[in-house]
C-alpha cells in the first residue's frame, strides 16, 4: 500500500488563510461589542424610563382637549410644581393625570360658573374649553391639607378630581411626576402645556 503524499500549502495560500482568520476574528469582536453596547443602551433606557422619565399612555377624556385618549406622554419625576402643570399620580391601582391647581395650605374656591379661585385670585385657564362647577362636593372655600395637592382635570364637566371627596387632594407620595412632552400622536408631538 502506497502512502499518499499531501502537498503543503504555498505562501500565497497561507497568506489568504491568515487574512480569512483575521477577518473572522475582527467580525466576531465587532459583533460582540455591538451586542454589549445595545444591551447597555437598552438597560440605561429602561432605568431612565422607570426611575426618572416614565412614559405613560392616556386613557379617558378628563384632560381633553389638552391630552386625548391614547396619547403617549413623557413625565419627569419631580415634586416642584407650578399652577397649570400637568401631573401624573397613583389613585388606587390606577395612574391618573390632572392639572396642578394649588399646593399645601392654599385656599381654593369655585364660583358657580366653574372659575377656580386660589387664595383670592381667579385663575386664567386658557387650556380649558368650557368652565364647569362639575361634580364638586367639597365644602368651599377649601384649604388644601399639608403635603397634598389640589388637582383638577381640563374637561371640568366630567372629570372626577380633587373637587370631589372620592379623590380629594393627592398626597405627595402618590405623585409620579410632571407631564412635559407628548410623543404620540406624531401630529401633536411636542411640549404639553
Image (spheres, rainbow, N blue to C red):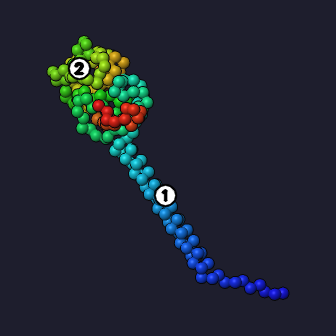
Residue 136 in view in this figure: no
Q: Counting residues from the N terminus, which is met first, the one under dot 2 or under dot 1?
A: 1
Question: Quadrant location of the N terminus?
Answer: bottom right
State the residue in front, 179 or 9. 9
Determine the image quadrant of residue 70.
Answer: top left
Determine the image quadrant of residue 8.
Answer: bottom right
Label 1 sits on residue: 35
Identify the secondary structure beneath mark 1: helix
Residue at coordinates 35% horizontally, 24% vertically from top-left? 65
State the residue in front, 81 or 67. 67
Q: Residue furthest right?
A: 1
Mark-to-mark CA distance, 2 and 1? 54 Å
Q: Is residue 147 left or right of residue 57?
A: left
Few, some or many residues within 10 Å of mark 1 (<14, 14–19, 20+) = few
Label 2 sits on residue: 116
Q: Is residue 142 above or below residue 36?
A: above
Residue at coordinates 70% horizontally, 84% vertically from top-left? 7
Amino acid at each position: 500500500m502506497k502512502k499518499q503524499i499531501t502537498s503543503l500549502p504555498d505562501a500565497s495560500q497561507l497568506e489568504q488563510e491568515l487574512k480569512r482568520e483575521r477577518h473572522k476574528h475582527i467580525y466576531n469582536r465587532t459583533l460582540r461589542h455591538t451586542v454589549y453596547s445595545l444591551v447597555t443602551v437598552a438597560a440605561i433606557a429602561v432605568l431612565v424610563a422607570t426611575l426618572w422619565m416614565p412614559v405613560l399612555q392616556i386613557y379617558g377624556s378628563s384632560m381633553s382637549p389638552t391630552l386625548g385618549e391614547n396619547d403617549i406622554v413623557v413625565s419627569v419625576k419631580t415634586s416642584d410644581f407650578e399652577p397649570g402643570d400637568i401631573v401624573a399620580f397613583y389613585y388606587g391601582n390606577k395612574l391618573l393625570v390632572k392639572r396642578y391647581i394649588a399646593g399645601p395650605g392654599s385656599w381654593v374656591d369655585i364660583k358657580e360658573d366653574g372659575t377656580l379661585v386660589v387664595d383670592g385670585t381667579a385663575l386664567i385657564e386658557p387650556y380649558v374649553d368650557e368652565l364647569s362647577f362639575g361634580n364638586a362636593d367639597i365644602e368651599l372655600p377649601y384649604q388644601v391639607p399639608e403635603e397634598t395637592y389640589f388637582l383638577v382635570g381640563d374637561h371640568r364637566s366630567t372629570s372626577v378630581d380633587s373637587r370631589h371627596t372620592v379623590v380629594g387632594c393627592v398626597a405627595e407620595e402618590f405623585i409620579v411626576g410632571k407631564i412635559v412632552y407628548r410623543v404620540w400622536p406624531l401630529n401633536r408631538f411636542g411640549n404639553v402645556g
